[in-house]
């Protein structure tokens, strides 16, 4: 049982607020939550927080963050937080399915639809149903379709048929439309979008040795087919789980852990690496997997820094050489290097290896943007800065050691059509047969992106 549900933007602006029981003391409960959230140290906030004192005494806040939005439920009862986290995750999926995608813009354009959905899902704070098959019989409000979706409009990596600079794998707005369109619309396309998405975390020491590597992967499905349509997903035959299992004649594609959605049938997984399922309409995560400390291919990037610091004049020179170790036919997009600098930097001069590159100072750090990096290439940048707050004795020889406050460097990037684990989808087969002659459209995409790619200087 929950008392309130609300959705906040990344800046704390209330987008949706629903009071189910009238025991909250007003809308200021959302402001109280955001103040507590922003007052906590560090970047990772606890998903469960408890208030004490005042008219919000002993109120529990349970929240998730999805697409830059905070979805929050409050309760004063002693109930399992895991059940509320599951409810919030299911609500996020339903809102994405009904609105087309989950973002501040789509929520703002579909406020009436969101409130109608909440009225059907929850009654006096008690969950009635989260089944789309049941909800579609009661939801009458039509979704307001957003503008065409583009990968580069988002701060996070978009999914399901987004356009990239490298290739258009599907129409950019194809997967951002609502699952349930107008009942009089006969042009609804039967389409399936399947994305293999991996998040790469790396820590590299100042001497170049690899300290940590971790890959978190997901196979995500968004289906516009009728619920219960059977499909089969064939994975790489050499795919194996754990170090003891080896398959095929090649080096093998190994992960440490794997988990599947409850709707996935695994009769053919052990023998042929085929996942069979009959998913409902909408979005779901078919499979999650993790790999640590042992990648089958080289890291996508290596950074070779060189630092010279003139203590006498306060002149700091940083030379950065970035090597892309992807295959020559692959490329990285939206590459950004972020390098914290010592306090007091007042000027920057730069020499970059390409005209499309851009570097600037901001918020105490150097930001080097590279829109596109081809596999096998090397890029470089020479940056000279004045740091008047760090002078040493006059006439002292320049030092090659990094001054206090310089580094570590971090990289963010996207790797279209590439998976760091080597996992690939061999085929996507549908048993669905439409009434007309048009066959369902199938879109499959592979994508890796950085999660925390850190290089010590």
Image (spheres, helix red, strand yellow):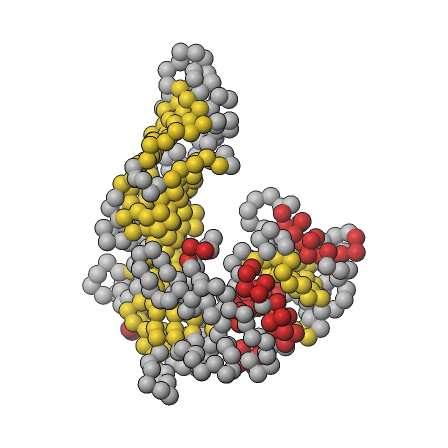
Report the front residue among 408 and 132: 132
Tell me: residue 222, above or below residue 406: below
Residue shown at 45%/64% (left/top)?
148
Q: Whole-percent x and y of residue 328? A: 23, 50
Residue 341: x, y in percent?
46, 32
Question: Could you tell me if residue 285 is visible in this image?
Answer: no
Q: Is residue 336 above or below residue 116?
A: above
Q: Residue furthest bottom?
A: 435
Side of 160 relative to 98 (left or right): left
Left or right: where does residue 83 sit relative to residue 50? left
**Image quadrant in which you'd find residue 420:** bottom left
- Whether residue 161 is visible: yes
Who is closer to the viewer here, 328 or 212? 328
Place of residue 171 in the rendered image (x, y in percent of width and height, measured from the top left): 37, 67
Q: Residue furthest right?
A: 55
Quarter location, residue 29? bottom right
Residue drawn at x 32%, y 48% as measured from the top left: 372
Residue 385, x across and y down, in percent: 42, 27
């Amino acid at each position: 049982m929950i008392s309130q549900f609300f959705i906040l933007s990344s800046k704390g602006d209330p987008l949706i607020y629903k009071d189910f029981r009238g025991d909250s003391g007003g809308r200021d409960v959302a402001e109280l939550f955001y103040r507590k959230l922003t007052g906590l140290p560090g970047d990772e906030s606890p998903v469960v927080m408890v208030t004490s004192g005042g008219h919000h005494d002993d109120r529990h806040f349970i929240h998730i963050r999805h697409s830059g939005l905070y979805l929050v439920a409050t309760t004063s009862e002693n109930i399992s937080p895991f059940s509320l986290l599951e409810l919030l995750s299911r609500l996020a999926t339903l809102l994405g399915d009904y609105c087309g995608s989950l973002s501040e813009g789509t929520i703002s354009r579909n406020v009436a639809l969101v409130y109608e959905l909440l009225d059907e899902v929850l009654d006096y704070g008690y969950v009635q149903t989260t089944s789309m098959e049941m909800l579609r019989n009661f939801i009458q409000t039509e979704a307001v379709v957003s503008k065409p979706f583009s990968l580069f409009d988002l701060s996070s990596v978009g999914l399901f048929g987004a356009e990239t600079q490298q290739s258009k794998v599907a129409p950019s707005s194809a997967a951002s439309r609502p699952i349930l369109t107008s009942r009089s619309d006969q042009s609804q396309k039967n389409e399936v979008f399947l994305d293999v998405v991996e998040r790469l975390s790396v820590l590299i020491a100042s001497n170049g040795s690899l300290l940590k590597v971790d890959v978190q992967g997901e196979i995500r499905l968004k289906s516009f087919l009728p619920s219960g349509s059977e499909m089969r997903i064939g994975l790489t035959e050499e795919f194996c789980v754990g170090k003891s299992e080896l398959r095929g004649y090649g080096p093998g594609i190994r992960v440490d852990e794997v988990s599947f959605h409850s709707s996935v049938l695994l009769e053919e997984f052990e023998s042929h690496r085929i996942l069979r399922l009959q998913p409902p309409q909408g979005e779901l995560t078919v499979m999650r997997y993790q790999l640590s400390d042992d990648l089958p291919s080289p890291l996508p990037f290596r950074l070779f820094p060189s630092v010279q610091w003139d203590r006498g004049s306060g002149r700091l020179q940083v030379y950065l050489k970035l090597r892309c170790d992807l295959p020559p036919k692959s490329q990285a997009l939206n590459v950004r290097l972020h390098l914290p600098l010592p306090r007091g930097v007042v000027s920057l001069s730069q020499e970059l290896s390409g005209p499309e590159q851009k570097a600037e100072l901001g918020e105490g750090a150097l930001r080097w943007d590279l829109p596109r990096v081809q596999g096998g290439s090397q890029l470089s940048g020479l940056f000279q800065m004045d740091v008047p707050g760090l002078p040493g004795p006059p006439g002292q020889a320049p030092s090659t050691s990094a001054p206090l406050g310089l580094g570590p460097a971090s990289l963010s990037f996207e790797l279209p059509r590439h998976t760091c684990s080597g996992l690939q989808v061999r085929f996507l087969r549908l048993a669905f047969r439409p009434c007309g002659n048009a066959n369902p459209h199938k879109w499959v995409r592979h994508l890796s992106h950085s999660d925390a790619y850190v290089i010590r200087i």
